[in-house]
Amino acid sequence: MRRAPDVRPPHLSPSASSGPAPGREALTVALSGAEFGWGSSGKLSAVLSALRERSPVPLRFVGLASGIGRLLLSQHPVERWYDLPESGPAVQDMLEELVRTEGVKAAVVVLDGPVAGALEAAGVPTVFVDSLPFLWTEGDRSALPLDATVYCAQRSVELPPECQEILASIPRLRWVEAIVGTPPVPRAGGGAGRPCRKVVVSLGGLRAPKLADWTSYPRLVVPAVLEALAAHGVREVRLAGNLPAGLLAEFVGRAPLPLRVTAGALPHGAFLAELAGCDALLASPGLTTLLEAGSLGVPTLCLPPQNLSQIFNGRFHSRAVDADVRVTWPEDVLREDEALALRAKGEDHALELIYEAIGQAAARTDADRVVAALSDRILAALRRTAAAADWGALATAVGTGGAAQVADAVLTAAGQSPPDA
């Protein structure tokens, strides 16, 4: 629900655009995703694909904020990107001017409540996408745009009691299925007993507001992952995430033989293509990644959580597939139940505990012991992924048609008739 802490001056940054069809005026849609990992941008990518397929009129897109996720959206014709101030009246003033100059008719916003609220205040019908409705408590109420034109909550396999009063108070709540992208190529066949030779390791966007050092997590987890993969007989690894180049080079250079590691950030379509061709996925358990892997039937192991939602996501996944494929932190690093207990005060309080625990573990003089313990846990979980399991169970439970459902809500908000209306 937050924006990155760095404040950059507003400016325009043009990107490729296919433009409207000759002789037809395009409908302008604004889009924005929370500066918190890559999940928001993955969902935006899926929704933009659905919008372009389903709109009865030409569309034009302008992007707001979403700085760390723009790479994931590079396959889409977003005509301009606008950086936003961090907070305050300057955000509202800038958005009102942008709405006038760009002729914005509707907006879709993923998980950034303040931007959604500012767009509504500027007179733009806004579809807010909440992929984490199970997460919120009364302590989060003020950050949620409860009066959005449409509040699309992604279906969940479980809704804790703490979130239900907030959800019940949303006047235009609409439940949607999982918002996932369509892979550009079909996944190769396979199943139980298939040799695990090619693996994708996904760390997501990593960067989050109020996280002082976002390299602590990969410094603990990536070496443990690579050691476990080598011991498991894996030969090829695709490491995906927005890691600094120097750290990536360090991981690749120190990878145990005979692993061949390639690394770097991937646009959304390229990431889906990697998933379609791999034998297994090891992921810090962002929900979009788990659902996209599930929609492809990819055996998936959940790495230790980076934040509060990933504790829930890993548990949801493990229960759905009915297999113990979730790796937790050693108890002397983090006790998950302590973080869950703090969420009653709001997500920030739980995040503070989690970030501090991971940072302290990375700074410990015996950090190598933490890495070794994680490697043992990851290897054990990898061996359990070799057994038969319904890897698509989580995606099946919540459905996978959410991108089209959100796209239709945006078109309706803009005064257009969706194809199935």
Image (cartoon, rainbow, N blue to C red):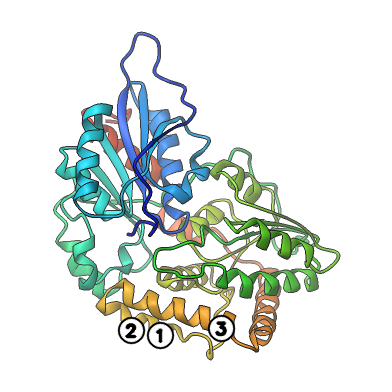
Q: Dot 2, how many residues are within 10 Å of its Cα: few (below 14), some (14-19), or many (20+)?
A: few
Q: Is residue 37 left or right of residue 135?
A: right
Marks 1 and 2: CB-CB under 8 Å? yes
- According to the image, label 2 marks what residue? 341
Is there any visible trace of residue 42 in the rendered image?
no
User: Quick one: which residue is furthest to the right in this view?
Assistant: 258
As helix, strand or loop, the secondary structure at mark 1 comes to helix
Nearer to us: label 3 or label 1: 3
Q: Which residue is mark 1?
A: 337
Q: In the current view of this chain or complex, which residue is farthest to the top?
A: 23
State the residue in front, 53 or 297: 53
Q: Residues within 10 Å of mark 1 (few under 14, many from 20)?
A: few
In the image: residue 358, left or right of residue 142: right
Report the Cα–Cα distance between label 3 and label 2: 21 Å
Q: Label 1 near label 3: C-beta < 8 Å?
A: no
Q: Is residue 339 above or below residue 206?
A: below
Q: Secondary structure at mark 3?
A: helix
Which label number is shown at residue 361?
Answer: 3
Residue 138's x, y, as percent?
Answer: 20, 72
Task: Give the x, y percent position of residue 200.
Answer: 66, 57
Q: Quadrant of the C terminus?
A: top left
**Within-10-Å neighbours for mark 3: few <14, some 14–19, many 20+:** many
Vertical arrangement, residue 375 with respect to residue 57, above or below: below
Q: Position of residue 329 (x, y in %)?
A: 55, 82
Looking at this rendering, what residue extends furthest in the front direction? 9
- Disc 2 element: helix
Q: Position of residue 309 (x, y in %)?
A: 41, 68
